[in-house]
Image (spheres, rainbow, N blue to C red):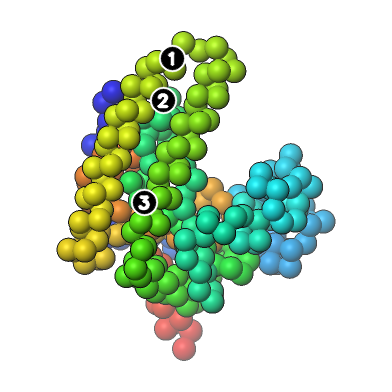
């Protein structure tokens, strides 16, 4: 099975990509803030109004799940104004939170990083071997509605602190492996239900996935000790309406090409560097002084 050769995500921080992505954020933000309907939706969302008919806010809980308990059977049933990240800690087991501070949580991406496990739907895979998320505890919709850069800066500081903490890399690797294992179980279950004969081929694929995963994990351990975080990590956001979940979440991605060998590049074009978000918000603030 061939894999796509993806560029380093640090290219997002270089011109002309950086300016293009910064402009994308400004355009999405302007469109959102100047649309009266989106502002009405946002007010209802922030007030947890479950009677409101949301028309423009994307990434909320699907109507078919409203009133049902989360798959974990932990916490309150889903409501109309919820997202899959709303009250995350109250709806998920403790081991699904890698780190917590006063303002945010660091959580794993439930998807596997490896497109080889997704056959004809590679876009469902992660963007890199390590694809974590930092989410605010408060109900915040997206970067398009932020008033200032404080929460973005806090999330970055939280991850930098976590990255240096003893045991952090092993937590990350365990989380990555969980995504691979979960996807493997789902694929095998689908084969069994459909009586598909592809299970033998998938078994060979999984042998390769496990082998490559062990090598990438060792490479991550080595480089975490020897390289600066800035040379390894991209912090990025997907501006609404291009975000899949309607709760602010910062993507934390291993940037070097070797960590992206088996991952998807489908979302690169909309991954706005956190630094660009901070610049836009601070530039706006300076114009209002």
Which residue is identified by label 3?
A: 173
Location of residue 282 by image quarter: bottom left
Residue nearest the observer in this picture, 178 or 25: 178
Find the residue positioned furthest to the right. 51
- In the rendered image, the quadrant that contains the N terminus is top left
Please tell me whether residue 215 is drawn above or below residue 50 in the rendered image: above
**Badge 3 element:** helix
From the image, state whether disc 3 or disc 2 is nearer to you.
3
Which residue is identified by label 2?
A: 119
Q: Residues within 10 Å of mark 2 (few under 14, many from 20)?
A: few
Residue 41 coordinates in the image, percent (x, y): 70, 60
Location of residue 195 by image quarter: top right
Q: Residues within 10 Å of mark 1 (few under 14, many from 20)?
A: few
Question: Which sits earlier in the primary sequence, circle 3 or circle 1?
Answer: 3
Which residue is identified by label 1?
A: 198
Residue 225 coordinates in the image, percent (x, y): 21, 63
On the question of residue 136 being in view, the answer is yes
């Amino acid at each position: 099975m061939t894999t796509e050769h993806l560029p380093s995500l640090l290219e997002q921080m270089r011109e002309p990509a950086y300016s293009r992505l910064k402009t994308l954020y400004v355009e999405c933000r302007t469109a959102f803030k100047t649309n009266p309907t989106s502002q009405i939706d946002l007010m209802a969302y922030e007030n947890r109004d479950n009677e409101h008919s949301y028309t423009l806010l994307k990434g909320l809980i699907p109507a078919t799940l409203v009133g049902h308990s989360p798959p974990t059977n932990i916490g309150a049933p889903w409501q109309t104004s919820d997202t899959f990240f709303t009250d995350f800690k109250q709806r998920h087991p403790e081991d699904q939170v890698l780190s917590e501070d006063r303002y945010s949580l660091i959580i794993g991406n439930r998807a596997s990083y490896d497109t080889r496990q997704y056959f004809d739907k590679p876009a469902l895979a992660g963007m890199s071997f390590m694809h974590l998320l930092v989410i605010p505890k408060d109900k915040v919709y997206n970067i398009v509605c932020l008033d200032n850069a404080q929460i973005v800066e806090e999330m970055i500081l939280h991850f930098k602190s976590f990255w240096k903490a003893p045991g952090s890399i092993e937590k990350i690797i365990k989380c990555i492996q969980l995504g691979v294992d979960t996807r493997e179980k789902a694929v095998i279950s689908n084969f069994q239900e459909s009586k598909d004969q592809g299970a033998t081929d998938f078994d060979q694929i999984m042998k390769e996935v496990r082998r490559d995963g062990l090598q990438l994990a060792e490479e991550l351990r080595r480089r975490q000790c020897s390289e600066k975080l800035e040379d390894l990590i991209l912090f990025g956001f997907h501006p609404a309406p291009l975000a899949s979940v309607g709760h602010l979440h910062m993507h934390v991605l291993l940037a070097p090409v070797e960590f992206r060998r088996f991952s998807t590049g489908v979302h690169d074009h909309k991954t706005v560097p956190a630094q660009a978000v901070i610049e836009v918000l601070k530039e706006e603030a300076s114009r209002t002084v």
